[in-house]
Amino acid sequence: MDAKQQIPNSKKILSNKSLLFFIIAIFLFATTLRTPITVVGPIISFIRDGLGISNGLAGFLTTIPLLAFAVVSPFAPRIARKFGMEWTLFYSVILLCVGIILRSIGLTSLLIVGTILIGVAIAFGNVLIPSFFKWKFPLHIGLLTGIYSVSMNISSGFAAGFSYPMATNSGWQVALGFSLVLGIVTLIFWLPILKQPKIALSPASAQAEKKQMWKVPLAWAVAGAMGFQSFLFYCTSTWLPEIFISQGLDAASAGWMVSVMQFSQIPMTFIIPILAEKLVSQRPIVFFFTFCYLIGFAGIFMEWTSLAILWMIFLGFAGGASFGLVLMLFSLRTESAYDAAELSGFAQSVGYFVAAIGPVLFGYVHDLTESWSIPLLLFIAISILLFLTSFMGSNNRTI
């Protein structure tokens, strides 16, 4: 079924209150996809000291979800075909809640198991939500993707900000467990969606089962774009504070710079999906975020630290624009919702594997060279690779 065939159903839905309710449900769902992860970083010392675990294991807590994304993503479309997208997403939130509860009990073994379950649950949302938009509202994919992206960024930013004071006042278990509230509220708002007609396997998606994405060059281009933008996001979030401290900023100011970068992404994550949907070719967006990446990284490489906030704004614009575009490519480069899910699963599997090794590789290069110069050149090199893959993926054709 193509977009034109789905338009009448979309208009019917848009004529009543279900669209508003759907937007609220999606907004809430999106908050569950990042907050369980971003609460960990600021309170990692509380977790380490509270459980008596090593720094290596504590740091691995932020890598486990990324590895889960890489492993689980290819299987999400197949499971959705069996249970339907609505029910699969509903079950994923239940699994997320179970993981949050286990992680917050206060035992090392349950902390690891809970973190794995959280990564598995979030992988389903990451993969299926873009294709869910393509099926439900083919005329409003850009708008819904923008709302979805913004809610993820806002909630993750606030979660990172509130987790430390919450851990200080109420304990790290409470800080880790707070995301459970969002999960429960999401389940409540998702119930009416389950009463709607089930998204069934269509003839087009049945053919998609026979496709092997790893044999399609366009799929690799989208996967490369996903991987390289994820590499840049997780590496900058992890290492930029250390880089700024080495250039003379105090720790508090260095941390604030990363916050500026993250919040600068928000307008781009809303605008870019809407713009990408309207453009025949998305290559102008690729030129825009590549320019922003290169300006931001060049300023940091030259150690013009007095303008650090400007470089962070450029990197925030670039990160938000590249992330927003990649989410849209899953829909724009495919013909059906389940094709989009297949592409999303493949691209995110590749992408999050690259993201998982990124911070480790970046730190290894720094230790090897005993300098931040080569790692910063690595940022620029990855930006160029992101340009090439995004440029190829933005060509007006479909898989």
Image (cartoon, helix red, strand yellow):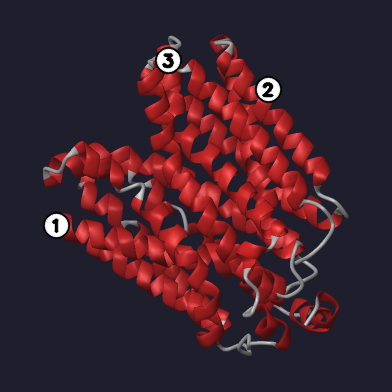
Picture mark count? 3
Nearer the observer: mark 2 or 3; the answer is: 3
Residue to which mark 1 is pinned: 107
Q: Quadrant of the N terminus?
A: bottom right
Residue to which mark 2 is pinned: 295
Residue, far left: 52
Q: Quadrant of residue 385?
A: top right
Q: Nearer the viewer, residue 153 or 382?
A: 382
Residue to which mark 3 is pinned: 371
Label 3 element class: loop
Q: From the top left corner, tell me how far across and down residue 245 is, in percent.
A: 40, 16
Amino acid, disc 2: Ile
Q: Quadrant of residue 379?
A: top right
Looking at the image, do the residues carrying marks 1 and 3 touch, with CB atoms under 8 Å apart? no
Task: Identify the residue at image location x=54%, y=37%.
Answer: 232
Please tell me whether residue 19 is drawn above or below residue 305 in the rendered image. below
Amino acid, disc 1: Leu
For residue 373, side relative to residue 332 (left or right) = left
Task: Identify the residue at image location x=57%, y=54%.
Answer: 151
Nearer the observer: mark 1 or 2; the answer is: 2
Q: From the top left corner, tell me how far across and down residue 204 is, in percent.
A: 73, 83
